[in-house]
Amino acid sequence: MTEPVLDSGTAVLDVATAEPEEKPLPARAGPGDGRTVRVASGQGFWGDWQEAPKLQVRHGAIDYLMLDYLAEITMSIMQKQRDRKPEAGYARDFVPLMEDLIEDLIAGDVRVVSNAGGVNPEGCRTELGFAFVGKSLPRRPRVAVITGDDLMDSLDDLIAAGHELRHMETGAPLSTVRGRVAAANAYLGAEPIIEALRQEADIVVAGRSTDTALTYAPLMHEFSWRKNDWDRLAHGVVAGHINECGCQASGGNSLVDWREIDLTLPATRSSKPRKTGPSS
């Protein structure tokens, strides 16, 4: 099991306003410390039901909110939007969602991990800054941006260095269609997300990260999983695949008693054991 371009991403926390002094980071507990960390799915695709993440945060016993917005067609749509308007190219509904939820996120100590940045993570972070202005909050939200997935400016150098980037089905090298390429992005894995969480980010805005990393990166961070701990990482990848298809994880395909069970509301927040109980 490998994560393509795992280490090429960069996590930048609040570029313009980050506090310069370094703060000692709390020691992360090990995988056998008896804690439970809950990563909730609030979005499976761009355009998904916007009430779902609100219900997760306001009623769910959760520690992290995972929001997955991207598919290949979504990336192409966002790129066309950015071509027309340079400040566009991200999931625009993410910004009002965070504006609506930020008080709850801070009060409940819930952290957000998303790939809402699309092809313009920096633009998304800028709009979040504007959205939080005027909010009465106990502290300034810490927003981290993950960069490094955009390879458009590196394509010619990659081709010149002998990387043909052949089509998976036809075998044709990318050079044969180079003039028609509008965007090029590499999947990033968990490492930059972990770095953002290590810097105590409240909201992580990534571009083209793997769907699974949005779920297992918080687990790697919380439980200090090593990058070569393949068994635990495999568990995390499976959990990530299930989590990003959230409604199916709760029985969307085959729920025998669906008429009798109300799945609208998660477990109430009062039931949330704050990182205690069986190990996850």
Image: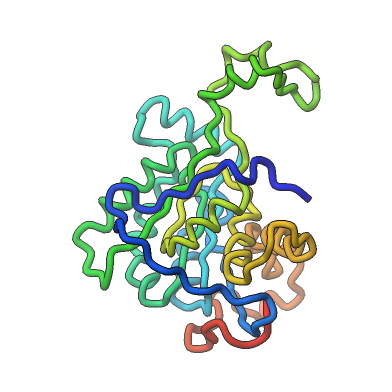
Q: Position of residue 1 (x, y in %)?
A: 78, 51
Residue 272 drawn above or below residue 178? below
What colour scheme governs how the chains and residues are painted in the rendered image of this protein?
rainbow
Q: Which of these two is toward me, 66 or 236?
A: 236
The residue most toward the left is 134
Residue 249 drawn above or below residue 81? below
Residue 136 drawn above or below residue 21? below
Where, by quadrant of the figure, is residue 133 drawn? bottom left
**Residue at figure coordinates x 56%, y 82% from the top left:** 275
Task: From the viewer's perspective, tell me whether residue 16 is left or right of residue 244.
Answer: left
Q: Which of these two is toward me, 175 or 246?
A: 175
**Residue at figure coordinates x 36%, y 30% from the top left:** 86
Q: Position of residue 140 (x, y in %)?
A: 28, 64
**Residue at figure coordinates x 30%, y 56% from the top left:** 20
Q: Position of residue 122 (x, y in %)?
A: 39, 42
Q: Position of residue 280 (x, y in %)?
A: 68, 76
Task: From the viewer's perspective, tell me whether residue 80 is left or right of residue 131.
Answer: right
**Residue at figure coordinates x 54%, y 51% from the top left:** 192
Residue 127 drawn above or below residue 242? above
Number of labels in the image equals 0
